[in-house]
Image: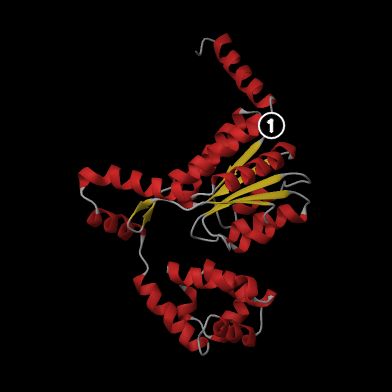
Amino acid sequence: MNAEYKRRIQKIYHTLTKTQRKVAEYLIDNPSKITLMSAEELAKACGVGEATVIRFARSLGYNGYSSMKEEFQRALILNLTSSKKVEDGLKRTESETVLQELLGTHLEVCNKMDILELTKALKRAAKILNESNDVYIFGEGAALVPAQELAFWLNRFGKKTWLFGTTGRSFFEHIANLRKNDLSVGFAYRKINFELRILFAETRKREGKNILFTDQILNPLNELADETIVTQRGGIGNYRSMAIPVIMADALLFEFAAVNRASLENLKALEQIRRDYGFE
């Protein structure tokens, strides 16, 4: 989905009815499908009435569903694939200035961060993490990178952690064992993943809690999240790096270690076992 249309939906999201939000979330998750669907078909896919779809289109400023559909069709044509994003970045940057460009865009994002508010959110998230039982971490595609970072260190800190980035039928195998007081952590950048919504919903249903990392202030998943960490990303052209999300994952790890002293002791115990068996 074109970023402009995501922003338009996010801007009015808080004004939408519960049924209209279903339409908004479906379009964010499935932007290409609308180009082939009638208003009736979209309504059926969202589990709402056709009138709701039409009212949603008008909420976005269109005369009706047809005009909204046409706009999405045009946006889809302009939507960039992964290879196009990289190609666009290469065209905009000379090889000798790639590092400078990347560091510059990341620095720009960092300078705009509200460090005080982010720190408060991370401390709250660390408290939730400390009070939880098992941890389930989800990140699909590029978002799997910060998810892996978080899962790797939490396991070393002695926190039982499950990492998965799969979708489809196998996804449900990972959430079948969710229990009361478990925690789910999701990384959702650009795409609002359907499976992540299921994971958060199931965690909440089973009296667990959710932490969301995202770049969207009005992310529809906010309603299911007990704490949300919002940060933008740097990059080149239309390519967006996961460096800042990884930094956010690291920040949560250190905040967690600060409130859970057993984390460091678990790490020392691991190192001692390695030394005992000659693995320095």
x then y, percent, for residue 252: 59, 39
**Mark 1, other Cα within 10 Å: few <14 / some 14–19 / many ≥20:** some
Residue 214: image x %, image y %?
Answer: 54, 54
In the picture, the quarter occupied by the N terminus is bottom left
Residue 17, position as x, y percentages in the image: 68, 77
Pick the front one: 223 or 77: 223
- Left/right placement of residue 234 relative to residue 147 reads left
Residue 38 in the image: above or below residue 97: below
202 sits left or right of 112 in the view: right
Say if residue 31 shows up in the picture. Answer: no
Number of labels in the image equals: 1
Image position of 250 (left or right of 256): left
Would you name the residue on which mark 1 appears?
259
Q: Which coloring applies here?
A: secondary structure
Q: Position of residue 170 (x, y in %)?
A: 59, 52
| Residue 94 position (above or below residue 41) | above
Give 59 or 183, whichever is nearer the viewer.
59
| SS for dot 1 | helix
For the point 64% across and 44% down, the residue is: 120
Q: What residue is drawn where x is 60% and y is 56%?
A: 196
Where residue 14 sits, quadrant-wise, is bottom right
Query: In this rendering, does residue 236 appear at all?
Result: yes
Amino acid at circle 1 = Val
- In the image, residue 189 sits, relative to residue 246, either above or below, namely below
At 62% from the left and 35% from the top, the residue drawn is 255
